[in-house]
Amino acid sequence: MTDATHSEGQEAPKSSKGPLILGLLLALLGGAGGFYATHQGLVLSSESAPEDVQPAETTEKFNEIAFVPLEPLMISMPRSSQYKHLRFRGELEVVQKHKAEVELVAPRIIDVLNGYLRAVELADIEAPESLVRLRSQMLRRVQIVSGPGRVNDLLIMEFVLN
C-alpha cells in the first residue's frame, strides 16, 4: 500500500529540449561551414583552377581534335508504332592524327549504327533518359569498329522521331 501511494504522488520528470536544440544548432552550423568551405574552394577543389589555364594550352588541345560528320540515317519504325521514322545525324570527335583512318571506316560505322538503331525497342527510344544511354551504346560500338584511341566522343546533332 505504501508503494501505491508513493507512485501516484510522483510525476515523471519532463525531458529537456536543450540537447535537441543544441544538436539542431550544431547541424546548421556544420552545414553552413561545409557550404562555405566548398564554395571557397577549400574542400573538393581541383589542383588548378580554371583561371590558371593558359590560352596556348587550350588552343593546343583544340588543335588535336577533329570532327568527322556521319551520313544521316533514316530508320523505319514498326507499323504498330505511332511514328514512321527515326532521323539520326551525328558527328564523331576524333584525334586529329586518326581522322583519315576514321573517315576510311565511316561506312562500317554507319552500318553498325544502323543495325543498332533498328534493334532498339521503341519504348527504349521514347523514354526521357534514353538519349544518354543510346549515345553511350552507340559510342562504344563506334570505338570498337574504329579501333582503340581514335574516337573520343559521339555528338548527336539530330535525333528526331516523326
Image (tube, grey):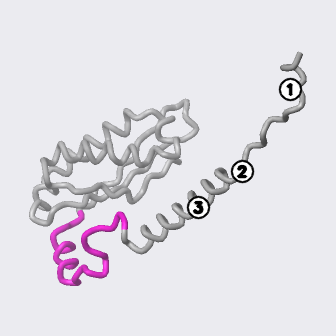
In percent of width and height, residue 78 lies at: 48, 32
Closer to the eye: label 1 or 3: 1
Residues packed near mark 1 inside 10 Å, few (<14), some (14 to 19) or many (20 plus): few
Residue bearing the label numbered 3: 28
Q: Earlier in the sequence, mark 1 or mark 3?
A: 1
In percent of width and height, residue 136 lies at: 33, 46
User: Tag 2's secondary structure?
Assistant: loop
Give residue 157's quadrant in the image.
Answer: bottom left
- Range of magenta residues: 43-67
Residues packed near mark 3 inside 10 Å, few (<14), some (14 to 19) or many (20 plus): few
Residue farthest to the top, as pictured: 1
Q: CA distance from mark 2 to mark 1?
A: 28 Å
User: Tag 1's secondary structure?
Assistant: helix
Residue bearing the label numbered 1: 6
**Residue occupying the point 20% across, 79% down:** 59
Closer to the eye: label 3 or 2: 2
Q: Are marks 3 and 2 in contact (CB under 8 Å)?
A: no
In percent of width and height, residue 80 lies at: 55, 30
The amino acid type found where label 3 is placed reads Leu
Q: Earlier in the sequence, mark 3 or mark 2?
A: 2
The amino acid type found where label 1 is placed reads His
> Quarter of the image containing the N terminus?
top right
Q: Earlier in the sequence, mark 2 or mark 1?
A: 1
Residue bearing the label numbered 2: 17
**Residue occupying the point 37% across, 40% down:** 117
* 7 part of magenta stretch: no
